[in-house]
Amino acid sequence: MPTDGGEAIQLTWDGGWAPLESPDGKFLYYTKNLQATSVWRVPMGGGQAAKVLEGLSTYVNLAMADKGIYFVPLQETALASSIQFLDLQTNQIRRIASFGRPVGSGDLGDDSGLAISPDGRWILYLQADQLAAELRLVEKFH
């Protein structure tokens, strides 16, 4: 729906999650699922949707920039992950950084993920250095 008011326009016809507007306002990017998903785009005025990326780890590990998309792909191994960049003009993907531990979120209840600063100079990401839990025995809890 236009911000000034008016009629709403249906942009997706086959579902969609996590919508992001392109910086130039021409496209709406969205994922098909919440995890292990693909990224699609559709013109803001309506039209045919097109797949732009396959293999996104989870919907929160996606950040739009002026020239492309930063993303965390599906983990290469149990202990290795990376941040990559899809250049939307050349359709080429390049690795920005590699890590020896999981990066990004895989939990649906977690709202953390990948973000980029408005000037495009900084990337913010979640890195879990330690996961722990405590088990406790409660006696006579009736």
Image: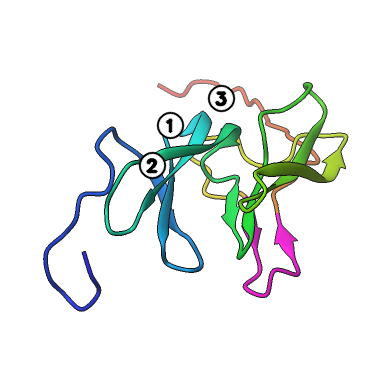
Number of marks in the rendered image: 3
Q: 74 or 8, which is in the foreground?
A: 8
| Point 69% across, 68% down: residue | 120
Image-based side of 84 in relation to 116, left or right: right
User: Which residues are the magenta region?
Assistant: 114-124
List x then y, in percent, for residue 132: 72, 33
Image-based side of 52 in relation to 131, left or right: left
List x then y, in percent, for residue 6: 12, 70
Query: Residue at label 1?
Result: 33
CB atoms at circles 3 and 2 under 8 Å apart? no
CB atoms at circles 1 and 2 under 8 Å apart? yes
Vertical arrangement, residue 38 with respect to residue 9, above or below:
above
Secondary structure beneath label 2: strand
Query: Residue at label 3?
Result: 138
**CA separation in Å, label 1 and label 2:** 6 Å
3 or 2: mark nearer the eye: 2
- Pointer 1 or 3: first along the chain: 1
Query: Residue at label 2?
Result: 17
- Pointer 1 or 2: first along the chain: 2
Residue 103 image label: none
CB atoms at circles 1 and 3 under 8 Å apart? no
Q: 105 or 8, which is in the foreground?
A: 8
List x then y, in percent, for residue 36: 55, 27
**CA separation in Å, label 3 and label 2:** 42 Å
Going by the numbered disc 2, the residue's amino acid type is: Trp
| Point 37% across, 41% down: residue | 49
- Pointer 3 or 2: first along the chain: 2
Dot 2 crowding, Cα within 10 Å, few <14, some 14–19, many 20+: few
Q: 130 or 141, which is in the foreground?
A: 130
| Point 19% across, 56% down: residue | 9
